[in-house]
Image (cartoon, helix red, strand yellow):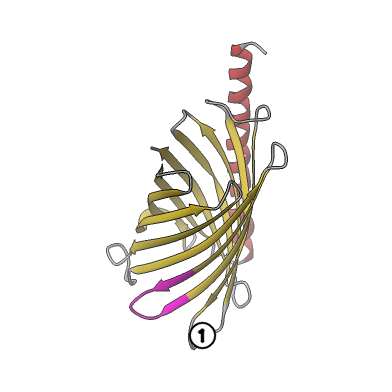
């Protein structure tokens, strides 16, 4: 394939993906609004920095801003919270790793809600039998606010693969999707069960820079009174 033909093919793929994401978001939004009129939509950009200290240890720092796009049947754009995140990851080999993290969420500045301190422990397993890579993540969290401490248990299954060829090269797109189940437990309250579905497309802009965008749809507390939440995600990932 000639260079200009390859570039045209990428442009068509990107345009098609964005168009399908928008159509899917509109479909979900209209369905939820018709069914219960309580859909909430967020725009959530993030910026992350990854650094590999040695072959078995790497660190990650990130900032995430969550902004309302739609609630109470009206469009709006106001910030909900800002959070700072750190993770340290220790790898046993190319497939297995464990991580510990800390996050602080600033919410009092934007809403009448408490800030949150969160501690995270997780185990990761990834396997690439061919061009597809499968990932499994087990995570436990302690979410500490002024009112209570929530213990949360999470399992996520992820699949990703390059969209052009058998391996990801500079300037090429890739696809990543995951499904995650969550159980939240807090003293004196009934447990809460959530389900999340995420689909994103990314581009390896350079050896050290990636960009991802996509959608996440959440069904929160569906064992009691379901709240449906739509996220429009964008992230820039820098590797040092």
Q: Main secondary structure of the magenta part?
A: strand
What residue is drawn where x is 63% and y is 14%? 5
What residue is rendered at 44% in x and 40% in y? Answer: 237
Q: How many marks?
A: 1
Q: Which residues are magenta?
A: 141-150
Please say whether residue 73 is visible from this viewpoint: yes
Answer with the quarter of the image where residue 52 lies: top left
The residue sitting at 61% across, 36% down in the picture is: 17
Circle 1 residue: 189
Task: Locate residue 32, reporting x and y percent.
Answer: 61, 60
Element assignment for label 1 = loop
Question: Compared with residue 161, is residue 119 higher up or lower down, i.e. above or below?
Answer: below
**In the image: residue 223, left or right of residue 105:** right
Residue 117 is a magenta residue: no
| Relative image position of residue 235 (x, y in whole percent) | 45, 43
Left or right side of 81 for 17: right
Image spot of residue 180 (x, y percent): 61, 60
Q: Nearer the viewer, residue 80 or 198?
A: 198
Q: Return the residue found at the far bottom.
A: 188
Outermost residue to the right: 129
Whether residue 190 is situated above or below residue 143 in the rendered picture: below
Residue 186 in picture, x, y percent from top left: 49, 81
State the quadrant of the C terminus.
top left
Residue 21 in the image: above or below residue 196: above
Q: Residue at x 40, y 80 (%)?
A: 148
Whether residue 146 appears in magenta in the rendering, the answer is yes
Could one spot residue 68 in this view of the protein? no
Q: Quadrant of residue 116?
A: bottom left
Q: Locate the N terminus by quadrant.
A: top right
């Amino acid at each position: 394939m000639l260079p200009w033909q390859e570039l045209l093919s990428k442009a068509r793929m990107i345009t098609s993906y964005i168009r399908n994401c928008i159509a899917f978001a509109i479909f979900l939004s209209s369905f939820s609004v018709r069914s219960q009129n309580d859909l909430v939509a967020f725009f959530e950009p993030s910026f992350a920095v990854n650094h590999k200290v040695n072959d078995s240890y790497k660190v990650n720092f990130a900032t995430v801003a969550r902004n309302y796009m739609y609630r109470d049947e009206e469009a709006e754009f106001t910030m909900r919270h800002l959070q700072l995140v750190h993770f340290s990851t220790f790898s046993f080999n190319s497939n297995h790793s464990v991580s510990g993290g800390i996050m602080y969420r600033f919410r009092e500045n934007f809403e009448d809600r408490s800030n949150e301190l969160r501690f995270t422990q997780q185990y990761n397993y990834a396997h690439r039998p061919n061009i597809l890579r499968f990932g499994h993540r087990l995570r436990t969290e302690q979410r500490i606010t002024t009112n209570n401490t929530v213990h949360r248990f999470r399992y996520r299954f992820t699949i990703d693969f390059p969209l052009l060829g058998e391996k990801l090269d500079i300037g090429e797109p890739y696809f990543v999707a995951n499904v995650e189940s969550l159980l939240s437990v807090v003293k004196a309250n009934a447990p809460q069960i959530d389900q999340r579905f995420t689909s994103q497309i990314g581009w390896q802009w350079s050896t050290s820079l990636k960009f991802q965008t996509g959608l996440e749809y959440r069904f929160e507390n569906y064992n009691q009174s379901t709240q449906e939440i739509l996220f429009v995600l964008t992230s820039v990932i820098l590797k040092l």
